[in-house]
Image (cartoon, grey):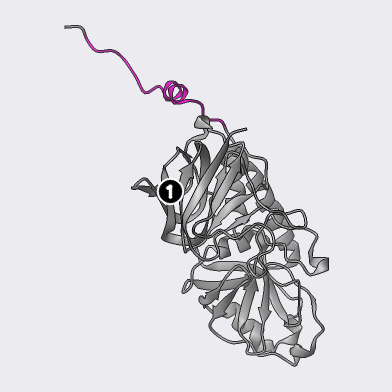
């Protein structure tokens, strides 16, 4: 079995190893973790023909620099519009490439997006906890943190030359509007607070991490709701603290909370929301639960079809040239 290594020369904060997440742990007070942008994570694995849900590298705005060691390995890079630097030559994310020993790869923030994903043709060796390698940012349970001086070991490292090339990112809305279903505690707010929430343009606050995204803007008046019992919370819940400031809960959210939730972001919009940056505008539109179910089902089907378009063997360079039929006619004889 071929083993490759990615020697980490630099890793920004919140760069971590994530698999699809730690399902079934909320009843024990354990956050699911997993990727912030689940679609981009799935796309990276699909582009390599990997089984769904395996461990990949999640890169934050802080960036990541690695040097390939021991053996070549093919990898896929997806997510936000990050800058990819391979041995001094820059390109964009959404591509499949092969690293050779001593190649230097740097992924850093580009024009847009907050998270990028690196999946590998092979299996990243990582510690598991409760059946998952997903690193939990608050407790550091799961896979070890990625830090400068560490090495990411890849077992069964493979070169998949027939996968190399640029990838088509998913078609997504580019506006700042996010769909929500109101509740479950919107009745614990001043009646004007719902209007304020839906009619305001918020901005993503600098207080944004894997646990949640705080929003700057109009505060929301509560009606004695801070006395409600703690209850389970989920990713996408818009929780409002006693100061009236809303926060969207994300991958490493707590398992229970006593603050009221004025609304819940649709799962298919949560991934897009996580790619917003501090200072980006955010607005909310309320839809009925019945409509949300239809949207979720359509989004799930669209995701299946999109991932299938990525999970294709492109063929060797020679096969691609023949398929494109780049040569036509002949040169006249002298």
- Residue 177 inside the magenta-drawn segment: no
Q: Mark 1 points at which residue?
A: 105
Q: Where is residue 34 in the image (x, y as percent from the top left)?
A: 66, 58
Reply above or below: 188 against 22: below
Left or right: 202 in relation to 195: left
Between 86 and 265, the one nearer to me in the picture? 86
Q: Where is residue 77 in the image (x, y as percent from the top left)?
A: 50, 47
Between 74 and 23, the one nearer to me in the picture? 74
Q: Is disc 1 placed on a helix, strand or loop?
A: strand
Magenta extent: 313-332
* Residue that protrudes farthest toward the bottom in the picture: 224
For residue 253, which quarter of the picture? Answer: bottom right
Q: Where is residue 258 in the image (x, y as percent from the top left)?
A: 76, 82
Number of labelled discs? 1
At 53% across and 33% down in the image, what residue appears? 159
Examine the rendering and report whether any part of residue 310 can be seen.
no
Left or right: 89 in relation to 181: left
Left or right: 329 in relation to 263: left
At 42% across and 42% down in the image, what residue appears? 102
Q: What crowding class fits label 1: few (fewer than 14 Cα within 10 Å), some (14-19), or many (20 or more)?
A: many
Between 162 and 69, the one nearer to me in the picture? 69
At 65% across and 51% down in the image, what residue appears? 126
- Residue 321 inside the magenta-drawn segment: yes
Q: Quadrant of the N terminus?
A: top right
Q: Position of residue 195 (x, y in %)?
A: 63, 83
Examine the rendering and report whether any part of residue 84 can be seen.
yes
* Residue that protrudes farthest toward the left in the picture: 334
Reply above or below: 88 against 27: above
Reply above or below: 72 against 88: above
Reply above or below: 250 against 49: below
């Amino acid at each position: 079995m071929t083993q490759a290594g990615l020697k980490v020369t630099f890793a920004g904060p919140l760069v971590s190893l994530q698999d699809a997440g730690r399902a079934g742990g909320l009843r024990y007070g354990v956050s699911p973790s997993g990727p912030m942008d689940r679609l981009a994570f799935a796309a990276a694995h699909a582009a390599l023909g990997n089984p769904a849900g395996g461990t990949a590298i999640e890169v934050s705005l802080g960036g990541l620099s690695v040097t390939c060691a021991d053996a070549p390995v093919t990898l896929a890079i997806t997510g936000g519009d990050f800058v990819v630097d391979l041995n001094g030559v820059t390109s964009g994310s959404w591509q499949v490439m092969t690293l050779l020993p001593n190649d230097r790869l740097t992924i850093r923030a580009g024009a847009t997006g907050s998270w990028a994903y690196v999946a590998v043709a092979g299996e990243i060796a990582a510690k598991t906890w409760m059946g998952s390698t997903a690193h939990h940012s608050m407790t550091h349970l799961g896979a070890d943190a990625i830090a400068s001086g560490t090495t990411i070991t890849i077992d069964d490292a493979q070169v998949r030359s027939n996968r190399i090339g640029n990838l088509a990112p998913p078609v997504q809305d580019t506006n700042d509007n996010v769909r929500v279903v109101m509740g479950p505690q919107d009745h614990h707010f001043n009646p004007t607070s719902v209007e304020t929430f839906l009619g305001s343009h918020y901005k993503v606050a600098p207080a944004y991490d894997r646990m949640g995204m705080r929003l700057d803007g109009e505060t929301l008046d509560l009606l004695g709701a801070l006395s409600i019992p703690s209850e389970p919370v989920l990713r996408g819940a818009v929780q409002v603290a006693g100061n009236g400031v809303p926060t969207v809960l994300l991958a490493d959210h707590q398992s229970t909370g006593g603050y009221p939730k004025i609304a819940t972001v649709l799962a298919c919009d949560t991934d897009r929301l996580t790619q917003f940056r501090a200072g980006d505008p955010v607005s909310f539109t309320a839809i009925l639960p019945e409509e949300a179910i239809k949207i979720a089902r359509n989004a799930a089907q669209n995701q299946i079809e999109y991932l299938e378009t990525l999970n294709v063997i492109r063929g060797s360079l020679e096969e691609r040239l023949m398929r494109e039929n780049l040569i036509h006619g002949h040169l006249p004889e002298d």
